[in-house]
Image (tube, rainbow, N blue to C red):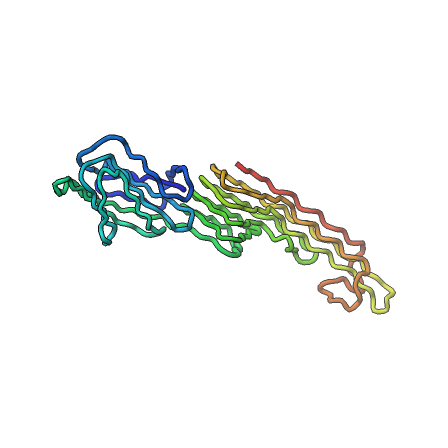
Amino acid sequence: MKAFRLILFSSLFLLTACAVELKDSDTEGKAASPSSPSIFIHTLTETSLNVQLVGLPEPQAYQVVFQWPAAPGRLVIQKNSQQPVEVFAHQRSFIDREVTGGETVTYTLQHFNDHNELLASIPISVQIPRDLILDGDIQLRSHREIKAHRIFLLPRTVITTEVFNLKMEAEEIHFTDSTIQNFKSEVFRASESHGRSGGQIQIRSTSGSGRLMIFLRGENGGNGKPGGISYNKKFKCFGTDGGHGGNAGSLKLQISDKSSLKTLITNEGGRAGQAGGYGAVPYNAPPTESIQYPCSTKREGRSGRDGARGTVDNL
């Protein structure tokens, strides 16, 4: 669970989605347990009020925590236009457990003394960050940069980057059996073509949780075209060369708190395409997939070479 503190300005308190100063609390996913100062005040002021926004483990789930020093009388707290809630000032804290990512919440805190006289009225506006939720199979079509306060990858989310670069940056990233990969293992280039190299993957966050599998993988090279046999079976053709495997992409994983994160990183170049066989297919095989008589190849085909592994910077 993450809590970040609102800085108080004049009579208006505002937290925006780009606030990044987060403080860890002791227990993940539970309500905050505020410990207020042991001082005593007679009138609540904006400078004596502490407001925190606490992120819960579920997407778009937050709490707003109010803290103040011990004081006489009572506080009347109104959220938006809802029914006000009354608490004794000596309780020193109040938690709103029903706030949702993406909304702006307005509070009014009124401090009354024991004679029911209004001592202070403080307006507060809190903008709750909207969490980014990723789900399903995501195929990059261009370089992509993903930024949010919190990012949630739902169960079995798979992001395939291919040749494109992916940059993911947040205060918190929550993975749930998630996969980020350059290429799928079963993808091959067309016949005789070299495999493509994977793009860069950069993940930066203050904290991460869950299980993440990363596959740095080059694309497999295409196999050479096999040689055909003449219709009278007197002549055989050589096959063509297989393509080289592509190089794996690079990874920079920079997550300050990995205590709740399990990562599995696989790093492998694309497999070499195999040489086309000598006289391996009949004369009526498709000419786009084979070398047919009269033969256009003058030598035996050769296999390509495997792609290189990528660089991994796991900070």
Residue 95, picture quadrant: top left
The residue at the far top in this view is 39
Relative to 286, residue 167 above or below:
above
Q: Nearer the viewer, residue 79 or 134?
A: 79
Residue in the image at 24% along x and 47% along y: 107
Residue in the image at 55% along x and 45% along y: 200
Q: Nearer the viewer, residue 98 or 127?
A: 98
Residue 71, picture quadrant: top left
- Image spot of residue 133 (x, y percent): 44, 52
Q: Is residue 271 left or right of residue 153?
A: right
Relative to 229, residue 153 above or below:
above
Give the quarter of the figure containing the N terminus: top left
- Image spot of residue 20 (x, y percent): 38, 40
Q: Is residue 179 left or right of residue 220?
A: left
- Image spot of residue 206 (x, y percent): 44, 39
Residue in the image at 58% along x and 50% along y: 182
- Image spot of residue 299 (x, y percent): 80, 54
